[in-house]
Image: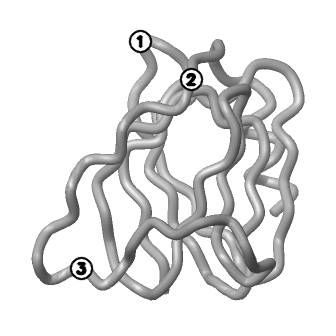
Amino acid sequence: MKRLITRLAVVMTAGAIAAVLPASSASALNRVSCTETGYLTLHNAGGSLCFANAGVQSVAIYGVDQIWTGNNKVTLEYVPRLGASATSETVEKWSYGKVTGDPIHKITRIRVW
């Protein structure tokens, strides 16, 4: 988790939550209201987005500055700053990370294990 926070600390400029793109029919991962601590929660200046269940989903979420994995092992594919190459990190269950410095430019894919 410390590695993720360190990498995220050197990343991008803000944005607001973008629309989540539709998931493929094989994905069970879905967006839910943020009513439980067990959900994956991504926060930015526009609020929070929460996800439940295992699966993979392509997304476009900008300016994330806090991540709570809840009861989920999570792999995030993201672009750390505008113009940078995409990278990915896997984070274990019950992990919290606050991005120091600039927030993540764009999360492009979420996988919940």
Residue 93 relative to residue 28: left or right: right
Q: Which residue is mark 3?
A: 27
Residue under the image location 45 percent in, 20 percent down: 84
Quarter of the image with the N terminus is bottom right
- Of 18 and 97, nearer the camera is 18
What kind of residue is marked 2?
Ala
Residue under the image location 11 percent in, 77 percent down: 25
Q: Are marks 1 and 2 in contact (CB under 8 Å)?
A: no
Q: Position of residue 56 (x, y in %)?
A: 32, 72
Q: Which residue is mark 1?
A: 83
Crowding around mark 3 (Cα neighbors within 10 Å: few <14, some 14 to 19, many 20+) is some
Residue 23 relative to residue 86: left or right: left
Crowding around mark 1 (Cα neighbors within 10 Å: few <14, some 14 to 19, many 20+) is few
- Mark 1 or 3 closer to N-term? 3
Secondary structure category for the residue under label 3: loop
- Mark 2 or 3 closer to N-term? 2
